[in-house]
Amino acid sequence: MDLKDFVAGSLTQIVEGIKKAQEGTANTGALISPAGANIASRKETPIMRTPDGHAYLHDVQFDVAVTVSDEKEAGAGASLRIFGAKLGAEGAVTYQNAAVSRVQFSVPVVWPGQILPELEKRLREEKQRSDSKVQSHNSNRPPGRMSA
């Protein structure tokens, strides 16, 4: 398997798994990968603006063993392939002319967000009430005395 296919397939399957979990828990009130205007800030996970409001930005870490193949078949050049061991009939592991290396990298991803409209509406109303209380409190305070 080519490295590009492995990375693309891994990220695609993670996204599909998140969407499936969101659909499976839609009626429970659970939020899997929450998004929206009022998501909680977390030190270890940056927040990013998305079309749905805000969402968490995650790094997907890859640590992959790859082989470098220099086979020339029908115009194909060298390529990076995911390392795979082959078991022989006696259970012996064999490798064929392969130099194995490790590739480590991360991919920043904003996972598909899940917004519960009722929760978003309630949070927005609570924020408006809180803001209006602060404004009301500040407008009822007597002006400060100016020193001469």
Image: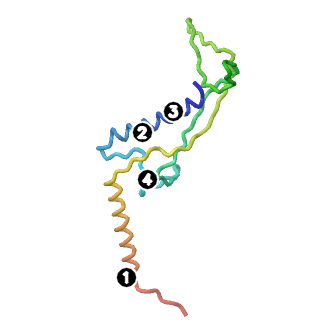
The type of residue carrying mark 1 is Asn
Q: Classify residue 128 as left or right of residue 11.
A: left
Considering only vertical position in the picture, is 144 above or below 93? below
Circle nearer the N terminus (1, 4): 4
Considering only vertical position in the picture, is 105 above or below 87? below
Report the Cα–Cα distance between label 3 and label 2: 12 Å
Which label number is shown at residue 37? none
Report the Cα–Cα distance between label 1 and label 3: 58 Å
Residue 144 coordinates in the image, percent (x, y): 46, 86
Residue at 69% in and 25% down = 78
Circle nearer the N terminus (3, 4): 3
Q: Which residue is mark 3?
A: 10
Residue at 41% in and 86% down = 142
Q: Which residue is mark 4?
A: 52
**Residues tagged 1 and 2 counted as in contact (Cβ below 8 A):** no
- Nearer the observer: mark 4 or 2; the answer is 4
Q: Which residue is mark 1?
A: 140
Crowdedness near tag 3: few (<14), some (14–19) or many (≥20) residues, C-alpha within 10 Å:
some
Residue 127 coordinates in the image, percent (x, y): 37, 64
Q: Which residue is mark 2?
A: 18
What SS does tag 4 mark? loop
Residue 87 coordinates in the image, percent (x, y): 56, 12
**Residues tagged 3 and 2 counted as in contact (Cβ below 8 A):** no
Residue 3 coordinates in the image, percent (x, y): 60, 29
Report the Cα–Cα distance between label 1 and label 4: 37 Å
Residue at 37% in and 77% down = 137
The type of residue carrying mark 3 is Ser
What SS does tag 3 mark? helix
Circle nearer the N terminus (1, 3): 3
- Nearer the observer: mark 1 or 4; the answer is 4
Q: Nearer the viewer, residue 71 or 120?
A: 71
